[in-house]
Image (cartoon, rainbow, N blue to C red):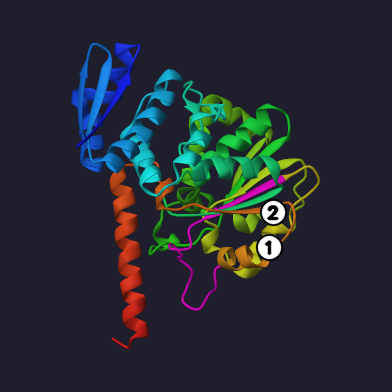
């Protein structure tokens, strides 16, 4: 049995580490098979030597977050554990040193919560075109909108344009009530939701009235040249090759483009190739273009979302294996 002792100056730090009803402690003990005890500012860990040393790596990272005044969530704790178990603990410093990107209308600070998200934010900052592909819940759209609003408020761009292809996910537009714009609005709702959170409804309404912020279907982009704008194409897996080329060639002087999508959720009719899948190959060696691949580890929603994604990935691997074997 290996034992490690850690002196903690502030008992409040120990309380924050342990979490509500010692929830964080129980998660760590289960993940590494160790036991904790604390007395008079001394924290002790017991277990297998490698398990204790790995657990300490997570604990030290957690204390770094605590000292910065950040709360420990289930998502952040499980993410740190997975990073250490994968031998990537050296990358964790990227998160402990990351800065707030933007604050929402309610004052909520936004920053990267995974290494993948930080790479994504860095790519947007450095490149004219950033393509982000990954599963639901990785913050692709949300962070892109935050960066767009930040650029707009800093006067780096004069307007924000957000667009999506109006492709039906198993539903028919004709069955929705209202005129064409009302039928299309549900497809654009996630973009409106993100903007509402960043700016507040009153500011957003004023920006839209002035034409500073535009949310529109992809078809409305044809024939335009978009100068001095921050442009986001969301759900890009549902673009065709022709639509993707049309969109990217709208890029004008002083503009920045972010393209987001998930190639596991393509709703195009059978036989139609995804423009997102193709563009990731076509532009992979072009300067000033960054392609970011987010994974299930970058999911920042409920932990169950990560488990669901993993389950689907396993099922897909099994299906492909059976198909290859003729079963």
Q: Is residue 168 above or below residue 32?
A: below
Quadrant housing the C terminus? bottom left
Residue 281 within the segment the image draws in magenta = no
Q: Nearer the viewer, residue 142 or 9?
A: 9
Give the x, y percent position of residue 34.
Answer: 21, 36
Quadrant housing the N terminus? top left
Q: CA distance from mark 2 to mark 1?
A: 7 Å
- The tag on residue 43 is none
Mark 2: secondary structure: strand
CB atoms at circles 2 and 1 under 8 Å apart? Answer: yes
Q: What range of the chain is rendered magenta?
A: 256-274
Residue topped by disc 2? 289
Residue topped by disc 1? 283
Give the x, y percent position of residue 202.
Answer: 54, 25
Which residue does the image show at 57% across and 44% down from the upper left? Answer: 119
Check the image and name the residue furthest to the bottom: 326
Count of numbered circles on the image: 2
Mark 1: secondary structure: loop
Which residue does the image show at 41% across and 30% down from the upper left? Answer: 61
Which residue does the image show at 53% across and 29% down from the upper left? Answer: 97
- Look at the image and tell me whether residue 191 can be seen: no
- Look at the image and tell me whether residue 37 can be seen: yes
Crowd tier of the residue under label 2, counting other residues whose Cα lies within 10 Å: few below 14, some 14–19, many 20 or above: many
The secondary structure making up most of the magenta span is: loop
* Residue 134 shown left or right of residue 220 in the figure: left
Q: Nearer the viewer, residue 175 or 6?
A: 6
Q: Which picture quadrant has residue 282?
A: bottom right
């Amino acid at each position: 049995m290996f034992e490690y002792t850690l002196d903690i100056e502030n008992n409040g730090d120990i309380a924050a580490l342990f979490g509500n009803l010692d929830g964080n402690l129980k998660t760590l003990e289960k993940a590494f098979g160790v036991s904790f005890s604390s007395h008079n500012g001394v924290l002790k860990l017991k277990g297998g030597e490698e398990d204790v040393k790995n657990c300490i790596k997570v604990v030290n990272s957690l204390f770094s977050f605590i000292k910065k005044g950040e709360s420990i969530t289930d998502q952040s704790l499980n993410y740190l554990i997975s990073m250490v178990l994968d031998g990537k603990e050296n990358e964790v410093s990227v998160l402990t040193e990351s800065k707030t990107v933007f604050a929402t209308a309610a004052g909520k600070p936004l920053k990267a919560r995974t290494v993948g998200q930080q790479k994504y934010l860095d790519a947007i900052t450095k490149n004219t075109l950033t393509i982000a592909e990954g599963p639901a819940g990785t913050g692709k759209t949300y962070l892109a909108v935050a960066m767009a609003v930040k650029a707009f408020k800093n006067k780096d761009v004069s307007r924000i344009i957000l667009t999506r292809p109006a492709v039906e996910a198993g539903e028919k537009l004709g069955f929705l009530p209202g005129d064409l714009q009302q039928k299309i609005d549900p497809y654009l709702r996630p973009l409106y939701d993100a903007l509402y959170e960043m700016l507040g409804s009153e500011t957003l309404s004023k920006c839209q009235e002035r034409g500073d912020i535009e949310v529109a279907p992809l078809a409305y982009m044809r024939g335009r040249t978009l100068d001095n704008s921050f442009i986001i194409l969301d759900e890009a897996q549902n673009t065709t090759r022709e639509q993707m080329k049309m969109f990217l060639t709208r890029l004008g002087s002083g503009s920045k483009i972010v393209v987001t999508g998930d190639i596991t959720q393509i709703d195009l009719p059978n036989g139609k190739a995804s423009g997102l899948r193709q563009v990731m190959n076509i532009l992979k060696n072009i300067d000033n273009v960054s392609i970011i691949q987010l994974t299930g580890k970058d999911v920042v929603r409920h932990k169950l979302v990560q488990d669901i994604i993993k389950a689907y990935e396993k099922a897909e691997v099994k299906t492909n294996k059976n198909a290859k074997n003729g079963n």
